[in-house]
Amino acid sequence: MAARADALLGEQRRLLIGGELVEASGGRTFPSISPWTEEEIARVPDADAGDALRVVDAACAAAPAWAAVPLPDRVRLVQRAADVLEERLDDFAVLDTADAGSPIRLTLQDGRAAVEAVRRLAGIAPELRGSTIPATDNLHLTVREPYGVALRIVAYNHPFMFAATKIAAPLLTGNTVIIKPSELAPLSALLMGEVLQDVFPPGVLSVVTGRDAALPRALVRDPRVRRIGFIGSAPTGRSIQRDAAEGAVKHVTLELGGKNALIAYPDVDPAEVARAAVEGMNFTWSGQSCMSTSRLLVHEAIADEVVAHAVEIIEARRLGSPFDPRSEQGTIVSRGQHDRILGLIDRAVAEGARIRTGGRRPDGGDRGLVIPPTVLDMVRPGQTVEQTEVFGPVLSVIRWGDQDDPVAIANGVQYGLTANIWTNDVTRALTVARRLEVGYVWVNGWPRLYAGVPFGGVKNSGVGVEDALEELESYTTSKSVNVIFRRG
């Protein structure tokens, strides 16, 4: 893998605009920094507002012809894109591991999951249809039409998977699409643009990168970009809503952060809860996952056993180089995020939390932005770490008793993405599921997404759902047509 990484990182990456691989205006670039070595590994095109105008011009020019392509032909092209991407999955994995610090075995899994998701959406695209309404004896029908130009801004924690899967719905529904990856992990998206350059007509797919807010702000504010989908933090999501409104009335969907709770009742096996808590934290991704159940709300009757089991599982995990296939956790994506997480751990301790494991660089660790899996016990509702999305490998344990309402604690944050309920009482499980202010619930499981089940959040966790037929529908507008056969 090392030799392949060196070869890929030695290649010059370019933007995909109008079907051509081009440099940013003026040849500007910015560095991509490895979170394992903290050294520059590549130069990335640094597009600006002028490049934003150029890419939107190209996407607009291609939009009418692409919308006119029959759905079966669009499906075939998207399936072809999945085939082409599949041929380079090892390369995408290598770039994500080098760029984002995620373990190589996980980035390989991400690639396979991405291709499967693209094929799944292509397979259900024909299910998106209009309807007829028997309003009168005349003909009343609805048809689905594309917005025109769609913009997808995606996060750094699953760089290739997000870039690949989030082009599918816009393209299948007849939109041209612009992908803007995170500046913290842009390399795999740029390679995706290269390998898909000849799959779609010029301007149908564009990939652009930029170091600061100038590029995405110009794209979001352009009135011709009528559909925007964003994956990232809540503050940035709100900023996108404001910027979009400056340009025009737009359809904006947001998949944002979470401060997700696992609620464990005393009628369940403590060892199973501990396993669910560890799996649910997504420590394999260093906790950099919006759906991590980062708050463990455990009944005091089983809390000691659950924490002990969780610590035992965690301390058996292997940390190391992201390129080591045995490594079970990689790095934090950047120095800034790494230091922010450590600061939140310090603040939690100052506010009364107790570190049961982790909290600092592992013994003998001399490189990499690595933070070991951390368990903070005795966290109380309302404390900073209980309210803040850490986006790192930090599990907060909140103990509750019979006099407490764990659902109220779970709901007492600004977010509402996911929740996990552990109980053997079916009635209780369904009652709690209804009370939870979230968009996605597991009962006696741990975070994974299921094919065709809509995923999305409420409150400050977002607007809209993805990974299902509803995602396809959201990239279309509905037009009502009334054909009058008789007058009078």
Image (spheres, rainbow, N blue to C red):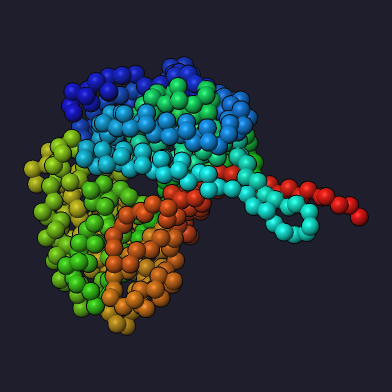
Q: Position of residue 37 (x, y in %)?
A: 20, 32
Residue placed furthest toward the bottom: 403
Q: Position of residue 56 (x, y in %)?
A: 57, 28
- Above or below, 166 relative to 68: below
Is any atom of residue 24 visible in this view? no
Quadrant housing residue 180: top left
Tell me the residue at 20%/78% (across/down): 301
Is any atom of residue 424 visible in this view? yes
Tell me the residue at 56%/28% (across/down): 59
Question: Image check: 388 left or right of 457?
Answer: left
Quadrant housing residue 321: top left
Q: Position of residue 261 (x, y in %)?
A: 33, 64
- Which quadrant holds the N terminus? top left
- Above or below, 292 relative to 229: below
Counting labels gives 0
Quadrant housing residue 248: top right
Q: Position of residue 65 (x, y in %)?
A: 61, 28
- Above or below, 93 relative to 362: above
Question: Image check: 156 left or right of 281?
Answer: right
Q: Nearer the viewer, residue 42 or 456?
A: 456
Residue placed furthest toward the left: 364
Tell me the residue at 30%/24% (across/down): 42
Q: Nearer the viewer, residue 264 or 118?
A: 118
Residue placed furthest toward the right: 488
Question: Image check: 315 left or right of 65?
Answer: left
Tell me the residue at 37%/28% (across/down): 84
